[in-house]
Amino acid sequence: MTDSIPNIADMIIEKLLANPKVPRNINADSRIVEDLAFDSLAVMNFVMEIEDTLDVSVPLDKLADIRTINDLASCLHDIKAEQA
Amino acid sequence: MTSGLFDKYASLKKSYESLVEASPRNPFGVVIERPLSATVGIIEGRETLLFGTNNYLGLSQSRHARDAAIETATSMGVGTTGSRIANGTFSLHKKLEKRLSEVFHRKHTMVFSTGYQANLGTISALVNKDDILFLDADSHASIYDGAKLSGAQVIRFRHNDPADLDKRLARTKNSPGARLVIVEGIYSMTGNIAPLKEFVDVKNRHNASLMVDEAHSFGVLGEHGRGVAELQNCEDGVDFVVGTFSKSLGTVGGYCVTDHDEIDLMRLCSRPYMFTASLPPEIIAATLAALEDIQNKPELRTALQRNSTQLHAGLKELGLTTSDFVSPVIAVTLETIPQAITFWNALLEEGVYVNLSLPPATPDNRPLLRCSVMAAHSPEEIAKAVTVFGKVARTLGVIS
Ligand SMILES: Cc1ncc(COP(=O)(O)O)c(C=O)c1O
């Protein structure tokens, strides 16, 4: 199943690594703000890109609880399931 | 004792200190000692051209509005000391609401004490946690804050992109709550103009409602100055227009106009309307006079358009990066923050005041020098601003 949480996390990491400013050693447990040095606007803009790939929309209040790449993957997974 | 209250300021303090260190003057602390006219003010003891206001029609200096304020302050005093719900409405509030409804050809108007509160008060009255808001990604802080106050789910769509909104509305077609789309007429940082007609088509297809913040476009665009909706001939498709008196009208305050008859119920569940003091009488009188100026002097809009075209073309010809939209807000995009700080200081030292906007308050993470044009600028003042921009840009190697 392509939309499992680990698959989504891999996809996120791949997209993040396409940005040369992102540290190379990130994994699913990396913290988006602290480890990747994203500010709130950068997080929102990055999430928009993933939304298109997965054809979902993430409400902003959901972003508030997200710390790690894994949190984001699991949030996207849940929304995708709800939307199906 | 502040017991850790300010610990969270550590990183802000660091960036602020490095900013202040890099800049001979605090970009957030410019003091306009006094305006000499709409277009010239005294800054640091020097006469300085003002290209960093929102005073598009120059009406903050309207003699007519000033006289109306003086006369009203003399007869009615200077404040209301309370909220309209708790402490009473003045007849002038009613008069202003009636006048705005006439100006917009709408049934109802609700006025607020600021434009910021107009967004908070309208959005929070219209949606709650069961509803979904669709916000243009580059929306003003007051729209984001209104969204937060409302508790509604917030979905951002790509700036000025009706197709992206379309996709996002489609994804939520099975949600039970109401759906409200919010866009601006002219975007305050970049001067970009919304493709409103296309947004209207999209929201109609999905049976959603539309609110448009015409803060920067009222008095500026459209044959009668009603903003982007009038310009693009799609006013029927807009459910709520929100705006401010603090820009083209030159005073302070905000409004929401609509044909929906529920407006009197909105007054009872809009906290930013209820729990704050209402507009003082002299401000209302000045605003009414400024509305007359806007109606009686269409030449102000023509002059503004001409001036916007002159500044936009001048900056583009220099080779600076600006939006392709010609509007009274013209922002020059630069690459780095230190470059922007140096550029901005040099402009001020040469007698031209513009706004320095730094990320993350800018749309694409790059710094902006935001210029705003007035109807009252003379062709010579605009030419001087362009010359100064060119001189500084060449000195800093931004252009060759
Ligand atoms: C798009 C937009 N909406 C609302 C506001 C708030 O208006 P005011 O400054 O009158 O409170 C502003 C300006 O600050 C704005 O740019």
Image (spheres, rainbow, N blue to C red):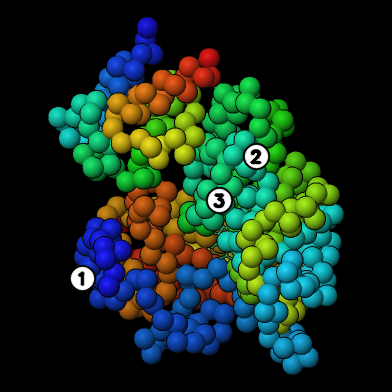
Q: Is residue B130 above or below residue B338?
A: above
Residue kind at label 3, given as amino acid type: Leu
- Name the residue located 48 percent from the left edge and 76 percent from the top edge: B50
Which tag, 3 or 1, sits closer to the chain's start?
A: 1
Q: Nearer the viewer, mark 3 or mark 2?
A: 3
Q: Which mark is residue B21?
A: 1
Q: Is residue A31 above or below residue B194?
A: above
The answer to whether marks 1 and 2 sit on the same chain is: yes
- Rendered image quadrant of residue B273: bottom right
- Quadrant assignment for the C terminus of chain B: bottom left
Name of the residue lying farthest toward the top: A1
Residue kind at label 1, given as amino acid type: Glu
Q: Which mark is residue B149?
A: 3
Q: How far is the residue under mark 3 from the one under mark 1?
A: 36 Å
List x then y, in percent, for residue A20.
Answer: 21, 34
Name of the residue lying farthest toward the bottom: B74
- Name the residue located 65 percent from the left edge and 43 percent from the top edge: B127
- Rendered image quadrant of residue A2: top left
Which tag, 1 or 2, sits closer to the chain's start?
A: 1
Q: Nearer the viewer, mark 3 or mark 1?
A: 3
- Rendered image quadrant of residue B250: bottom right
Q: Secondary structure at mark 2?
A: strand
Q: Nearer the viewer, mark 1 or mark 2?
A: 2
State the residue position of label 2. Answer: B180
